[in-house]
Image (cartoon, helix red, strand yellow):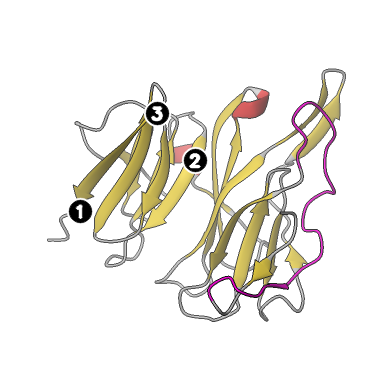
Amino acid sequence: SNKVHRSLNQGDDWETLSDDLTQGGIPGNVPFGTLTTLAEHPRHFGQLAVGSDDGLVHVTMDGGHSWKQLNLPIQTTWSNKQGAGHFWVAEVMWSQHDDNLLVVALNGYRHDRFDAMVFATEDMGKHWKDWGSALPQEPVNALVESEDREGWWVVGTDGGAYLTIDGGQSFTHIHANLPRVPVHDLARGSVISIIFYFECNRFYFSILIDLE
C-alpha cells in the first residue's frame, strides 16, 4: 500500500492513518509507489517512521494525525537521458537506547547503484551522519540494534553482515563463518538472527553477541 493502515483487533478492522506517502507512483514495467518499511518507536506509542520504494521517508509523532517528510542527505530520485531513477528505502529504525536516533538505509541496486547508504539523524532530519562511508560498497538491505548495548548495530548487505560498536563510526564483518551472500533480514536481540538467501534457498543463521 502507499498508505499506513492500523488494526487494534488483530486485523478484524482497519483504519487508515495517512494519505499517500509515496511520490504517487512511477510508471514502467515495474511500477513503484509503495511503502516498504515501517518502524514504531520502542518507547513512544504512535511515533512512527515509514519509507517508500521511491525514496521518501516520513515520520509521525502523534499516531498518524500529522506526517512530516524528512529531508534526506542525498538526492533519492533523478531524471536524465538514461531515464528516471530512485532509491528504495530498505529500512527505517528507531533506537531503543537514544530516544532521538533514527537510522535509515537506502538501496540503489535496482538502478546499478551499489553504494552502502546508511544515514542517522538525531534531530528529525536537520543533520545526518553518514554510516555508509564506513561500510564496503555493497547495497544495504537491513538494520538491527542490540537490545543490550548502546551503539551496537548490525547492517545486512548484499555481501554479508557487519557490526558496529561505536554508533556507525566503524564496521567489521560480523563472523568469519557467515557466507558472502545477501543478508535480507535481521532480528533484534543479544542473539543476532540473520536471514540470508543463496541460489533461491532461504537459510537461518544465529550469532551470539558476547557482551563481556
Percent across and percent down for residue 37 are: 59, 54
Q: Are marks 3 and 1 in contact (CB under 8 Å)?
A: no
Q: Is residue 78 above or below residue 123?
A: above
Relative to 205, 158 lies left or right = right
Decide whether residue 162 is among the magenta residues. Answer: no
Residue 23 shown left or right of residue 160 in the figure: right
Asked if one can make out residue 167 in the rendered structure from this viewpoint, the answer is no
| Residue bearing mark 1 | 209
Residue 19 inside the magenta-drawn segment: yes
Q: Amino acid at mark 3?
A: Gly
What is the crowding at mark 3: few (fewer than 14 residues within 10 Å), some, or many (at least 20)?
some
Q: CA distance from mark 2 to mark 1?
A: 21 Å
Say if mark 2 contacts mark 1, CB within 8 Å: no
Instruction: Pick whichever, 178 or 101, lies toward us.
Output: 178
Q: Residue at x 31, y 54 (%)?
A: 165
Camera-near label (2 vs 1) is: 2
Q: Where, quadrant-wise, is the C terminus in this rendering?
A: bottom left
Question: Which residue corresponds to mark 3?
Answer: 159
What is the residue that sits farthest to the front in this orientation?
A: 12
Q: Which residue is mark 2?
A: 141
Q: Residue at the spot x=49%, y=28% of the render?
A: 137
The answer to whether one can see residue 202 in this image is yes
Residues rendered magenta in the picture: 10-32
Disc 2 marks a residue whose amino acid type is: Asn
Residue displayed at 34% across by 66% down: 150
Q: Is residue 161 above or below residue 59?
A: above
